[in-house]
Image: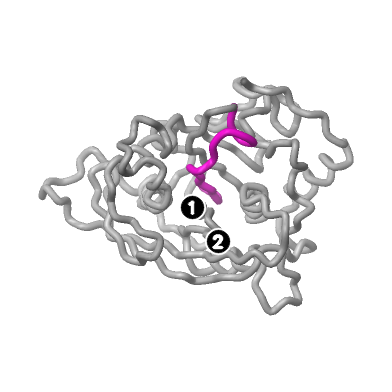
Amino acid sequence: MVHHQKSEDPAAIAGLMKLLKQPASQTVRSESMTWLVPGNSSPIWSRRLRYNLEGRPRHQSDTRWREFDVEIENRLWSMWGGLHPRAPWFDSRVRGRQSLGCYVVACCAASIFRRLGDWTSKLLDAIVYSQRWDQNLGPDEMSVQCDFQDIHFLVQMELVAFGHVYSAPASSSMSLLEALSYFFTRFQWGILECQERRLAFGFSSSHDGGYFLYDCSEWDKPIFPDGMGASYLLRARQLMVLLYCMVVTLNLRCKKVGFRLYNVDMVRLPSRNGSSSSGARKDNEEAEAKPT
């Protein structure tokens, strides 16, 4: 069941729009618990809402960009798959336990499809489908091998930043904003780990690129209709919008909760069957500049 959007305080909406549309974090120095939606409300990209934040109906040509839904014009877009790791289609030996593998493969997919405008709902499903077998991706493994679209990857994960969500700027502990700012001066794709939750994220400077957040763990409220779930991708132009999406997704309602950021670096290995990966998409050959 899709719900009508709740009426919100116009002043609150105006404040949120001002926060999300500022070009850079010059005044905001840390994420804030005040960004969280009330307990009986839904994130602005929720599939339970008929309208986007600007009050425009979803699933219309003027609120679509390629396969993305426009959440905030020129600021935030969402794309939705149709497959969830908990789907009964998966073998019981892996069902619901392959989320980490999906996040790793999402980073590998981002290294192939560098133009986020080329991503599709079928690609999101392919990421989840790739984990139909147990690929032995344990939570403490820093070096793993995985396959996606006939390409064999060796993936190295490295802890590169950690801190506490909502840390004050003067604190000795990094806030999530400070950690992300540090991360994107040096790295491109990563995994955020906070409590028992993980999210894949990254940046592409190519045409139709930007920041992205990939999630395949949500089920039911507040993102999906009752008894439903799927993977989805959020695309943002600004780091502040990515940060906002992370904070709302984590939905932490207390301070001093630790987080860790892992860099995900990958190299392609020869195909296991010795053949070329002719069905895989070629990389965008444009040089990738690091965000500043």
Task: Please tell me which residue is depicted at 53% across the width and 35% down the height of the picture.
Answer: 79
User: With respect to residue 222, does 167 lie above or below?
Assistant: below
| Mark 2 neighbour density, 10 Å: few (under 14) some (14–19) many (20 or more) | some
Residue 158: where, in percent of width, then height? 42, 69
Q: What is the secondary structure assignment of the residue under circle 2? A: loop
User: With respect to residue 24, does 50 lie above or below?
Assistant: above
Q: Is residue 88 left or right of residue 13?
A: left
Q: Closer to the observer: label 2 or label 1?
A: 1
Residue 266 colored magenta? no
Q: Which residue is mark 1?
A: 200
Residue 242: where, in percent of width, then height? 62, 51
Task: Please tell me which residue is depicted at 53% across the width and 48% down the height of the picture.
Answer: 212
Amino acid carrying label 1: it is Ala
Q: Which residue is mark 2?
A: 291
Q: Quadrant of the C terminus?
A: bottom right
Q: Is residue 199 left or right of residue 28?
A: left
> Do we see residue 23 in this rendering?
yes
Residue 222 colored magenta? yes
Residue 273: where, in percent of width, then height? 11, 47
Q: Is residue 115 left or right of residue 281?
A: right
Judged from this view, the residue extending furthest toward the front is 92
Task: Please tell me which residue is depicted at 75% across the width and 58% down the height of the picture.
Answer: 32
Magenta stretch, residue numbers: 209-225
Judged from this view, the residue extending furthest toward the left is 274
Task: Please tell me which residue is depicted at 41% across the width and 42% down the height of the picture.
Answer: 96
Q: Is residue 254 left or right of residue 112?
A: right
Q: Earlier in the sequence, mark 2 or mark 1?
A: 1
> Do we see residue 130 in this rendering?
no
